[in-house]
């Protein structure tokens, strides 16, 4: 009935698998949990414990294939109709997590895709982790009601349920560089194919807040990925807020203002973003400036 699919890389997945396994047993359902390790070098001993649990498989790939390809591979290995994709670095906060998805399936038998959402730790982390924490809370940890205001763009791939036949029609694009934004492209492909995407409040916690410096570097890398998607016509410029603003400024010949701000204040921007009071407004200007220079 339910295939739970988890890609992992250098992460201890066993505590999450244990909790999922326990909840599935409690619900007395037919299920499987498949974990594919993208050729990592850590936590093999811990993760191999997955194979001691009933209906659970942990397998290490011989080579690293990337975030998109590993999710597609997981789907091909799945036995059942309902696929629940979870990222390795999430934690369940609700003892009814599996039950909530099962209830949704029961009362929405014609569903195609449903996203459960994400939350972040309530306690403020260390100063060097504030940017990621603030961004996550303000831009990602949204209620289902808020996400429904922008159904497709607010979708993330870390906690979603999808029918297997629907996934087979869309899949993750394996042609793009392994530079993030596969979430955005997948959601666009869902929209383009007129796939019904629904949102519910069945959140997981995102573990392991990254340092602000690492998050900023990931931001730079992801913007390169976004540029690739636009240049190769995988995404229209008006699909994401950042690229829509970029397009507007370029058309109105005002992009020079952003470029001037970025060139003049780049160092000060980074100081703010890596400091004790990071501003998301400055973060957005930084992203726009960096993107326009690519």
Image (cartoon, rainbow, N blue to C red):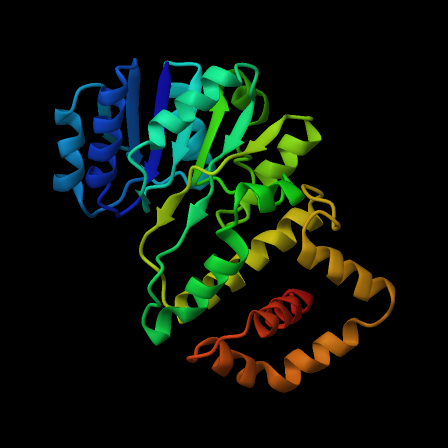
User: How far from the left and from the top, in percent, is residue 131?
Assistant: 45, 68
User: How far from the left and from the top, in percent, is residue 62?
Assistant: 28, 34
Task: Left or right? Give the position of 262 relative to 159.
Answer: right
Task: Left or right? Give the position of 130 relative to 37.
Answer: right
Q: Name the quarter where the C terminus is drawn.
A: bottom right
Q: Is residue 232 above or below residue 50?
A: below
The residue lying at 36 percent from left, 67 percent from top is 211
The residue lying at 64 percent from left, 55 percent from top is 227
The residue lying at 36 percent from left, 21 percent from top is 3
Residue in the foreground of this view, choosing between 172 and 81: 81
Residue in the foreground of this view, choosing between 254 and 173: 254
User: How far from the left and from the top, in percent, is residue 177?
Assistant: 53, 47
Residue in the foreground of this view, choosing between 73 and 261: 261
User: How far from the left and from the top, in percent, is residue 144?
Assistant: 54, 41
Task: Left or right? Give the position of 239 relative to 86.
Answer: right
Q: Name the quarter where the N terminus is drawn.
A: top left
For the image, the number of numbered tags is 0
Residue in the foreground of this view, choosing between 55 and 250: 55
Q: Is residue 32 above or below residue 67?
A: above
Determine the residue located farthest toward the right in the rendered image.
252
The residue lying at 47 percent from left, 19 percent from top is 105
Q: Is residue 271 above or below residue 123?
A: below
């Amino acid at each position: 009935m339910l295939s739970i699919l988890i890609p992992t890389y250098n992460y201890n997945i066993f505590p999450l698998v244990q909790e999922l396994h326990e909840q599935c047993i409690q619900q007395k359902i037919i299920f499987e949990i498949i974990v594919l390790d993208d050729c990592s070098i850590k936590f093999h001993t811990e993760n191999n414990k997955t194979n001691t649990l009933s209906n659970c498989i942990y397998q290490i790939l011989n080579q690293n294939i990337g975030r998109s390809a590993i999710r597609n591979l997981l789907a091909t290995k799945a036995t059942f109709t309902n696929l629940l994709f979870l990222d390795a670095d999430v934690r369940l906060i609700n003892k009814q997590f599996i039950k909530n998805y099962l209830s949704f399936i029961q009362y929405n038998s014609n569903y195609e895709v449903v996203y459960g959402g994400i939350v972040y730790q309530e306690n403020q982390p260390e100063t060097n982790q504030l940017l990621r924490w603030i961004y996550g809370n303000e831009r990602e940890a949204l209620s289902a009601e808020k996400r429904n205001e922008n159904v497709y763009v607010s979708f993330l791939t870390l906690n979603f349920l999808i029918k297997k036949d629907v996934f087979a029609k869309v899949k993750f694009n394996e042609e793009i560089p392994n530079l993030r934004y596969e979430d955005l492209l997948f959601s666009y492909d869902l929209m383009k194919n007129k796939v019904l995407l629904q949102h519910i409040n069945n959140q997981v916690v995102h573990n392991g807040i990254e340092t602000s410096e690492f998050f900023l570097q990931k931001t730079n890398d992801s913007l390169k990925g976004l540029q690739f998607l636009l240049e190769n016509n995988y995404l229209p410029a008006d699909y994401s807020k950042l690229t829509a603003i970029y397009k507007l400024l370029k058309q109105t010949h005002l992009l020079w203002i952003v470029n001037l701000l970025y060139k003049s204040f780049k160092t000060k921007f980074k100081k703010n973003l890596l400091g004790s009071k990071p501003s998301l407004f400055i973060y957005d200007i930084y992203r726009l400036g960096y993107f326009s220079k690519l």
